[in-house]
Image (cartoon, rainbow, N blue to C red):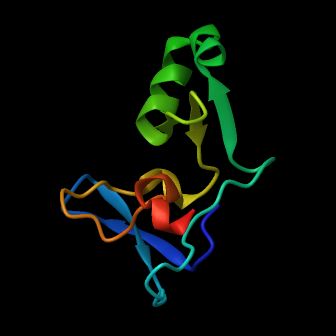
Amino acid sequence: MLCVLTELRSSPIHGFGVFLLQDVKKGGLIWRYQPGFDQTYTQKDLEALPELARNFIVTYGFYCKGEDSWILPGDYDRHTNHSGHPTTFTLSDNPNMM
């Protein structure tokens, strides 16, 4: 679940993107998994779904290697574009933040 104010706008990276509407301090929390709102799918769960549902999850979700599962955000985070020069990171990307 996004923990900051955002909006969807046209994005030069990929159709639509999520944009922050407030400043965030370096190292500040932008998103966290919220049980009951964000959804988790194991590979077995994913394979049991119809093809259109699988494609949706793979397109709008992300694979969490440490959990060996797919996460589907319940909000605009599913429109986060992935830049070649990201300005954000996950805790697993930065061991100093764990």
Up the image or down, 28 lies above or below 1; here it is below
Q: In this view, does 91 lie to the left or right of 93?
A: right
Direction from residue 15 to residue 97 in the image, left or right: right
18 left or right, relative to 30:
left
Quadrant of the drawing holding the C terminus:
bottom right
Q: In which quarter of the image is residue 13?
A: bottom left
Residue nearest the viewer, comparing 50 with 86? 86
* 29 versus 47 height, above or below: below
Relative to 90, residue 45 above or below:
above
x and y percentages locating residue 22 in the rendered image: 49, 89
Residue, x 53% and y 59% (percent of image)?
A: 76
Question: In the image, residue 25 lies at what x, y percent?
Answer: 47, 88
The residue at the point 57 percent across, 27 percent down is 68
User: Which of the two residues, 98 or 44, is positioned nearer the viewer here?
Assistant: 98
Give me the residue at 27% from left, 64% from top: 86
Name the image quarter holding residue 5: bottom right
Q: In this view, does 51 lie above or below 76?
A: above
Q: In this view, does 72 lie to the left or right of 61?
A: right
Q: Which of 65 and 55 is in front in this view?
A: 65
- The residue shown at (60%, 57%) is 75
Number of numbered discs visible in the structure rendering: 0
Q: Position of residue 85 (x, y in %)?
A: 20, 64
Q: Decide which of 51, 23 is in the foreground and name it.
A: 23
